[in-house]
């Protein structure tokens, strides 16, 4: 089992990858990527059973769906750092004909990506379908899905919640990136989400919470979620994060949702992030 300290070191390198990818491309979404770094690091380097020798079926493995596909930089970094493809390929992020598109896509055949995502509201439905297929095939592994909190304003999300609870899809673990921000501003100013815990409970889900920028809390939260599977209810983790976490001038604001840092800003950001595994 990877130690908390080693996970923190990996997370620091992943954050450097995010900043460098988005800066080079002068396009992308650093805010949510930085905010979800602990989650992705703990999932791929500690809690999820997965195989970098990738196959689309994922039989006997845990599988992951990134519903909020715009935070692809953190996804690509973690995939590369865990052996799915050469880390040097991160240098091609958002280039024409690159396998590392702005939103994860399957056409280019990037290992680790099973579904094209980024049309918000759809990924959770795919996750439910994948989890059901595992149950039908007597595959005892889990399906993980990540969604943004602003994404919960999409109606399809709530249809998927109803379906998953009704059909007792209890091998599904959904995490909500609960940072209170979306592209146009704070959630409460765009469309208030109200009492999220009460909403998910009323839809028949097991609801957990964790601090998403505390590595120990994330690891414990993911373990707790796994312990709740197989009990007749799908599981959701409401994960409190700060958008842009780890870079002081990006943190806690929607303004860095989809803006690339300039040269000076990238330099300042990287100065705050320790290089632990070597830059690509």
Image: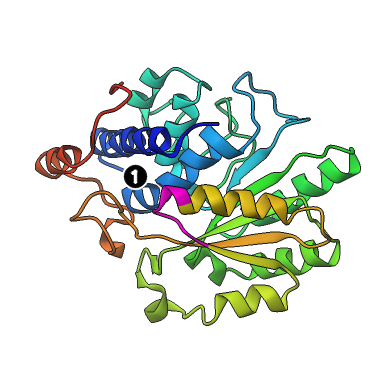
Residue at point 40% right, 69% down?
Answer: 180
| Most foreground residue, 227 or 69 | 227
Give left or right: position of 175 versus 11: right
From the image, tell me which residue sits under label 1.
28
In the rendered image, which quarter contains the C terminus?
top left
Which range is magenta?
A: 210-216
Give the left or right position of residue 174, taking residue 138 as reference: left
Residue at the extreme left of the image, as rendered: 264
Query: Is residue 67 in view from this perspective?
Result: no
Query: Residue 253, position in %: x, y?
Result: 28, 64
Depth check: give the residue in front, 280 or 141: 141
**Residue 93 included in the magenta stretch of the image:** no
Residue 78: image location, x then y, percent: 46, 33
Q: Quadrant of the N terminus?
A: top right
Q: Quadrant of residue 152?
A: bottom right
Percent across and percent down for residue 70 are 45, 48
> Is residue 213 found inside the magenta-colored segment of the image?
yes
């Amino acid at each position: 089992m990877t130690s908390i300290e080693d996970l923190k070191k990996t997370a620091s390198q992943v954050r450097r990858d995010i900043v460098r990818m988005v800066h080079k491309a002068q396009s992308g979404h650093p805010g949510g990527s930085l905010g979800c770094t602990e989650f992705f690091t703990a999932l791929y380097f500690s809690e999820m059973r997965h195989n970098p020798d990738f196959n689309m079926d994922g039989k006997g493995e845990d599988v992951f769906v990134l519903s909020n596909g715009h935070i692809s930089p953190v996804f690509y970094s973690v995939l590369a750092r865990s052996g799915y493809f050469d880390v040097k390929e991160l240098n091609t992020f958002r280039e024409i004909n690159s396998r590392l598109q702005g939103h994860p896509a399957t056409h280019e055949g990037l290992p680790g990506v099973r579904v094209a995502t980024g049309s918000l509201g759809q990924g959770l439905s795919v996750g439910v379908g994948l989890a059901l297929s595992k149950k039908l095939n007597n595959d005892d592994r889990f399906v993980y899905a990540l969604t943004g909190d602003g994404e919960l304003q999409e109606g399809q999300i709530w249809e998927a919640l109803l379906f998953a609870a009704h059909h007792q899809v209890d091998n599904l673990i959904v995490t909500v990136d609960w940072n209170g921000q979306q592209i146009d501003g704070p959630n409460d100013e765009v469309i208030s989400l109200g009492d999220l815990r009460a909403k998910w409970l009323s839809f028949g889900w097991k609801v957990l919470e964790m601090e998403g920028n505390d590595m120990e809390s994330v690891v414990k939260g993911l373990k707790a979620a796994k312990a709740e599977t197989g009990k007749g209810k799908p599981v959701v983790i409401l994960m409190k994060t700060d958008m842009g976490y780890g870079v002081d001038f990006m943190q806690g604001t929607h303004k860095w949702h989809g803006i690339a840092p300039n040269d000076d800003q990238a330099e300042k950001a990287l100065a705050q992030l320790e290089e632990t595994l070597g830059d690509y």
